[in-house]
Amino acid sequence: MKLLRVRKDSYHDSVFLMLATQELKASGGVREAVVAMGTDMNRDLLSGMGFGGPDLDGAGPNDLLVAVEAQDAAKAEAALDRALELVDRKKASSASGLGGSGLTRTGSLDAALSRLPKANLAVISLPGAYAAREARKALEKGLHVMLFSDNVSLEEEVDLKRRAAAKGLLVMGPDCGTAIVNGQPLCFANVVRSGGVGVAAASGTGLQEVTCLVDRYGAGISQAVGTGGRDLKNPEVGGRTMLLTIAALAADPATSVIVVISKPPAPETAKAVMDALARSGKPCVVHFLGLSDPSVLGKPAADIQIASDLEDCARRAAALSLGRAYKPVDWDLPESEISQIIDRESAGFSPSQKHLRGLYTGGTLADEALFLLQPLLGPIWSNNQTNPALVPPDPQVSREHTIVDLGDDVFTVGRPHPMIDPSTRTDRLDAEAEDPSVAVLLLDLVLGYGSHPDPAGALVPHIQAAREKAAARGGRLSVVASVTGTPSDFQGFEEQKRKLQAAGVVVMPSNSQAARLSARILQKGAAR
């Protein structure tokens, strides 16, 4: 039974919508649930899911949509009532403050500043249509902006960053989900030790992977700033936030090493970034994921090192910060142990098992795996592909070798991000388990603030079921993963690893090592 309710003029932020969807899906008898605003994209999504009708057609972007598919009408009605109860409870808490937290909810930026006059940063999480307007207000008040919102137009981003640059302010984003400012994690971030490494990144999980590995290698983080994905890539934006961040890190006495992470920038922006790093007077490490033409960087200055992947970036930065000699590392384990793992994992593949499936919650980690694996395995299908010919026609269906970024908009419209709600990935994992051609599953697990409290625990039953199905067909499913996190993250870094390993998952120290190991397992299986 599918039911839809529309509550007129009931706007709610994206974080509340994600949490409400997650809670609703946990209700008894509920098969699918969406709590979302009535934007064109969300209405199209719900129509495609079978919730179309006059109520949906008449909804506008300020109207709240609650859609439920349940076992029967009674359970669907109960779930809808539960969702609207959550909405009413939120409205009541907004009117009375935030309970016993000691915080007060305010209705405007001016009201918030009157209560916290020394604030210098605003975090904005609104639909893209409204986010830019609120960001402009914050800039006019002299505040730096962390723009969590996506779907902000290129024109709005350029305008915001021009305004910010004129005031010496930073606009992190749009679609900036991770930052660490003066040791305080913001949004999706990890608990890392303080130290001398300052990071400027146009990627969220790339920033998380590098900061966590820097922590693991004994160094620490001074600042970690997300710029938004278009900052370097689009020449109209021109790296404005990146260039301001580099200048700020150069002037920061707590920062001794500067790290820059991004997808390949526009050529003119790449030159500006490299020139800014050369002027910083500090040792720097740069990693542009998937850069096919290093000549766009020119000849790096003596103090600038070019890293080969995210792990290498962290190793170089930690060595510089600690005053140690840099040593490249292929594997944390001895080669003999790597060979034993490959032999064990590749034994038992059936003749039909030839393909890899990467199911990623982190977009940058998916990109890194794609760039590392394609030279080793050949063409790989992905919704993150730069080659349009290798973008799957249906993102919900894998073919041959496939790497899926499950945090992409196509998977998150009306649903929580898979780092928050693992069901997007577990549903896809269940589907991949039905494909007899799959030999290796490659997974990331991202811990930290904002992420699910037990991502490994959510995955393990589905991994076990997938392995049992492969065995019943006379084959073997190899599962390789990496965990992005630190021992201080609330999920428990070692406990998450232990749960995966107990389910037969090979857990590698980094995404890079996990990707390369999965390729070698597949290659060894094909050679048998």
Image (cartoon, rainbow, N blue to C red):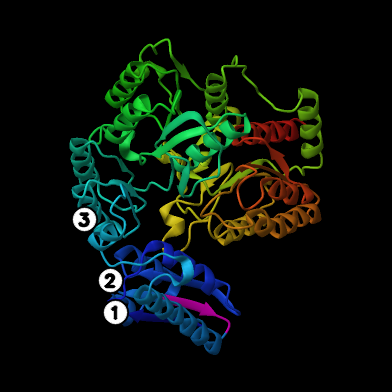
Q: Measured along the vertical axis of the image, is residue 290 above or below residue 72?
A: above
521 or 28: nearer the viewer: 28
Magenta stretch prevailing secondary structure: strand
Residue at x 77%, y 37% (from the top left corner): 346
Mark 1: few, some, or many residues within 10 Å (few <14, many ≥20)? some
168 or 254: nearer the viewer: 254
Q: Which mark is residue 62?
A: 2
Tell me the distance, in whole angstroms, between the alpha carbons under discs 1 and 3: 22 Å
Q: Measured along the vertical axis of the image, is residue 133 above or below residue 519?
A: below
- Label 2 near label 1: C-beta < 8 Å? yes
Q: For the residues carrying marks 1 and 3, which lies nearer the camera in this image?
A: 3
* Mark 1 lies on residue: 8
As shown in the figure, which amino acid type bears the numbered disc 2? Asn
Is 69 part of what is drawn in magenta?
A: yes
Q: Earlier in the sequence, mark 1 or mark 2?
A: 1
For numbered disc 1, what is the local secondary structure? Answer: loop
Mark 2: few, some, or many residues within 10 Å (few <14, many ≥20)? some
Q: Position of residue 321 (x, y in %)?
A: 53, 22
Work out whether residue 377 can be spotted. yes
Left or right? Give the position of 151 relative to 200. left
Total labels drawn: 3
As shown in the figure, which amino acid type bears the numbered disc 3? Arg
Q: Earlier in the sequence, mark 1 or mark 3?
A: 1
Q: Measured along the vertical axis of the image, is residue 254 above or below residue 74?
A: above
As shown in the figure, which amino acid type bears the numbered disc 1? Lys
Q: Position of residue 500 (x, y in %)?
A: 72, 49
Tell me the distance, in whole angstroms, between the alpha carbons under discs 1 and 2: 7 Å
